[in-house]
Amino acid sequence: MARDKLKTYRQKRDFRRTSEPAGERRSSRRSPVFVIQEHNATTHHFDFRLEIDGVLVSWSVPKGPSTDPREKRLAIRTEDHPLDYADFEGMIPEDEYGGGPVIVWDTGAFENGKTGDRPPSLAQQLDDHHLVVVLHGKKLSGGYALTFLREENGRDLWLLVKMDDADADARRNPVNTQRESVLSGRMIDEVEAEADDDSG
Ligand code: MN
């Protein structure tokens, strides 16, 4: 099942050219993971990914996530990515769908944020176009809602909004104040500079 979901991901990539993973990792019974990758492609954005049924369901968030419940952040659905993408950092070759450096801006476990006797599964919530998740990251924690807005030019537009809970904080702005990778401590510009050094 996960292999079919990754067809678009694989079709877009030449794995002889890119160091991105082809996607062999299988899910286990541990908690699902989320990852937010900062990606300096043609346009700078953050890729928000949630592990659901063996793949990373993905959205591109131009402004990145907010910790302020009053801020609605546009999130454009992109193709499902393999689970091993969750710890990918490095350079995507130029002319491969935008190219550019990637860092893991935040990652951790997450939970289904819908409660009650029989809360809908995350896959069901995705089908219903409304997800609530509780993140346990290093920079972000607490509830976030993803709500489908509309389709535009063949793209599914969603909104990513912080839930108004104990982790909400309008004064924080981690996208600007906590720029470093949670895996390597590097800034995205350093990843790009190191790649330039390597190529000569
Ligand atoms: Mn991206």
Image: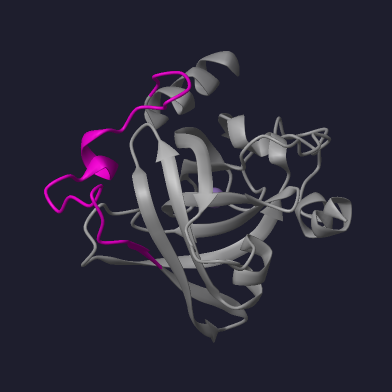
Q: Which residues are magenta?
A: 160-186
From the top left corner, tell me how far across and down residue 110 is, in percent: 51, 44
Residue positioned 57% across, 66% down in the render? 77
From the top left corner, tell me how far across and down residue 178 is, in percent: 27, 33
Residue nearest the viewer, comparing 14 with 7: 7
Residue nearest the viewer, comparing 75 with 124: 124
Q: Is residue 45 visible?
A: yes
Vertical comparison of 155 with 81: above or below: below
Vertical comparison of 156 with 32: above or below: below
Residue nearest the viewer, comparing 99 with 32: 32
From the top left corner, tell me how far across and down residue 75 is, in percent: 45, 65
Per the image, is 152 magenta? no
Q: Split into 4 quadrants, where in the image is the C terminus?
A: top right
Residue positioned 40% across, 23% down in the render? 190
Q: Is residue 130 left or right of residue 137?
A: right
Residue nearest the viewer, comparing 111 with 155: 111
